[in-house]
Image (spheres, rainbow, N blue to C red):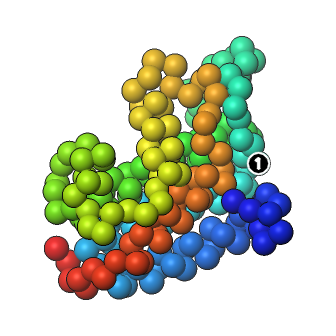
Amino acid sequence: MEDATGEPLNRTQIEERCRELASRVACLIRRVPQLSDALDFAIGAIYALLKAIKFGYVDRTKALSPKYWTSLAARAGNMGRGGLPGRDHWVAGFYFNSALMRISAVYERTLKELSGRRQGPVPDLLRLIMPPFGNNAQLEKVRIEVNNLKHEECGLSGGRKVKLEEAIGALIELVDEIEKRRLPRNCG
């Protein structure tokens, strides 16, 4: 994401995009009640992104260091004694992962609603939707990242491919797609 001059957005601008997105989702919840449950996940994703920013989330493209695993063991031990993690990068990453999973979930649930199918892989659901989704490159990037997080042996310990701005961009893509469709106003 860039500002009007083509420069990358700063944290304040990213937070503003999140607030704008939350307002748009609020309107969609009222306008398209059959997507309200899925859009609840979108609001949760926006909240998680804002919390990740608050806790100092930094995009990570490199592998986690051995120090990370030592700190994780100490954090787990602290939790075993009743403590909770502090305000640190691990908590920021926790919120970012939560946002990614929620974005992926709302994407798939929306595709199921729009296609009229209750199951099936995302590429198959996309082929059933008319008019077709215009731009979903960031949504697909998030979906693939979440699948790697869930199913790959190393998860994302080798590095992330989705940046904070792309996660917000994915939500914007989804909201844009829902807004441009003339959907019935009753629960399906």
For the point 78% across and 72% down, the residue is 4
The residue beneath circle 1 is: 56
Left or right, 158 with reference to 134: right
Relative depth, front residue between 91 and 181: 181
Looking at the picture, does residue 24 appear above or below residue 104?
A: below
Q: In which quadrant of the rendered view does residue 184 lie?
A: bottom left
Q: In which quadrant of the rendered view does residue 17 lie?
A: bottom right
Looking at the picture, does residue 83 appear above or below residue 116?
A: above
Pinpoint residue 34: horizontal percent, then vertical percent: 25, 74
Q: Amino acid at mark 1?
A: Gly
- Secondary structure beneath label 1: loop
Which quarter of the figure is the N terminus placed in?
bottom right
Instruction: Determine if residue 166 is in view.
Output: yes
For the point 50% across and 37% down, the residue is 145
For the point 46% across and 79% down, the residue is 26
Pinpoint residue 2: horizontal percent, then vertical percent: 74, 62
Left or right, 135 with reference to 117: right
Pinpoint residue 133: horizontal percent, then vertical percent: 38, 62
For the point 59% across and 59% down, the residue is 168
Left or right, 3 with reference to 186: right
Relative depth, front residue between 93 and 161: 161
